[in-house]
Image (tube, grey):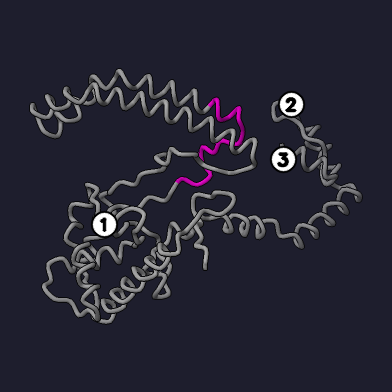
């Protein structure tokens, strides 16, 4: 394909299949490259490509749509550092995204009785978050910390009605097929975690689980079709209409835990502790102001860059 593009641009010979390549064919192609016309065209194209700098503009285009607000630590940005977010602090929808360093700092304070904070409100917020940290590493909690997952970006996007119907029927068939298997999976899941009583509880949940799978299948089916109609007929770019569960999940890993424990064991200097505490306080205040402004999605309904309308 690339060789054909070179030929169409007039800067190279016509392509030939590898299975049909012979010494004579290869020699004839090299002779064609010696043609002054082709060499002049190649030189002219190289000058145009140098001016255009396609790689640079391609990178700028990629970065312009990259959901950087969803992958960076809110606290570190306030102290002039750019670090990837690995945890969420607070309940969903009103959370702060924090990096491993900030999470390690909060974990290191969970056994301390007093902290050199400038505000008692920060002390209460920090201690409440830290108190549930150990549980939130594995289990979700309404408040505290849990693993942060970057929302799915431009994946499984339904661009037209046809694609919406295909995605809807595919999801419907997939989930309906999985529903009967819950007769085995659900008791087995609870039996592995809670023994015989867990198995009995899993058997009790079987009918509800099957009904939930069927309901989810219908919800996803309708959502995919409506999303296809919206994107294909009305020019939107919605990832979904009402099925917001179509997002990625991040799980705790042993590598992340090892990095976290290493940072905790190293400790933090007094200056660093004060920087983090003030940054957390400021980030929480900014989050409150942002929520009070009632953020809305932009016109293209991109699942990231939420904007707040000012009065």
Q: Earlier in the sequence, mark 2 or mark 1?
A: 2
Q: Which residue is mark 3?
A: 2
Magenta segment range?
Answer: 152-166
Task: Return the mark for residue 20.
Answer: 2
Q: Secondary structure at mark 3?
A: helix
Indicate left or right for 243 with 116 as reference.
right
Question: On the image, which quarter does residue 51 sit in?
Answer: bottom right
Q: Residue at left 24%, top 56%?
A: 143
Indicate left or right for 68 with 178 as reference.
right
Q: Residue at left 24%, top 78%?
A: 119
Task: Return the mark for residue 145.
Answer: 1
Mark 1 surroundings: few (<14), some (14-19) or many (≥20) residues within 10 A: many
Question: On the image, which quarter does residue 117 sit in?
Answer: bottom left
Q: Are marks 2 and 3 in contact (CB under 8 Å)?
A: no
Reply yes or no: does residue 158 show up in magenta: yes
Could you say which is closer to the camera, residue 35 or residue 92? 92
Q: In the rendered image of this protein, does residue 86 appear above or below residue 18? A: below
Could you say which is closer to the camera, residue 129 or residue 49? 129
Mark 3 surroundings: few (<14), some (14-19) or many (≥20) residues within 10 A: few
Task: Return the mark for residue 95.
Answer: none
Instruction: Indicate the position of residue 190 as horizontal and vertical percent values.
Output: 16, 30
Residue at the farthest front position: 311
Q: Residue at left 51%, top 60%?
A: 307
Instruction: Indicate the position of residue 92 as horizontal and vertical percent values.
Output: 33, 53
């Amino acid at each position: 394909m690339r060789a054909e593009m070179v030929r169409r641009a007039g800067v190279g010979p016509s392509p030939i299949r590898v299975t049909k390549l012979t010494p004579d064919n290869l020699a004839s192609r090299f002779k064609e490259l010696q043609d002054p016309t082709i060499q002049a065209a190649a030189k002219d194209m190289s000058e145009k490509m140098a001016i255009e700098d396609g790689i640079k503009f391609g990178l700028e285009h990629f970065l312009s749509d990259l959901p950087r607000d969803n992958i960076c630590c809110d606290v570190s940005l306030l102290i002039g550092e750019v670090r990837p977010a690995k945890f969420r602090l607070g309940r969903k929808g009103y959370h702060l995204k924090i990096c491993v360093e900030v999470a390690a700092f909060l974990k290191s304070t969970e056994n301390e009785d007093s902290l050199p904070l400038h505000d008692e409100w920060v002390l209460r917020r920090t201690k409440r978050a830290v108190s549930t940290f150990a549980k939130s590493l594995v289990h979700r909690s309404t408040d505290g910390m849990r693993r942060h997952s970057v929302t799915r970006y431009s994946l499984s996007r339904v661009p037209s009605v046809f694609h919406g119907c295909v995605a809807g029927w595919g999801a419907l068939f997939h989930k309906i097929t999985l529903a009967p298997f819950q007769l085995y999976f659900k008791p087995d899941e609870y039996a592995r975690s809670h023994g015989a009583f867990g198995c009995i509880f899993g058997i009790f949940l079987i009918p509800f689980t099957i009904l939930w799978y069927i309901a989810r299948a219908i919800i996803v089916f309708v959502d995919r079709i409506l999303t296809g109609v919206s994107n294909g007929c009305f020019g939107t770019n919605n990832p979904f209409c009402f099925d917001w569960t179509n997002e990625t999940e991040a799980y705790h890993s042993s590598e992340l835990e090892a990095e976290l424990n290493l940072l905790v064991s190293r400790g933090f200097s007094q200056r660093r502790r004060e920087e983090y505490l003030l940054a957390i306080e400021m980030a929480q205040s900014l989050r409150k102001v942002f929520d009070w402004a009632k953020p809305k999605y932009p016109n293209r309904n991109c699942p990231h860059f939420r904007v707040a309308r000012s009065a």
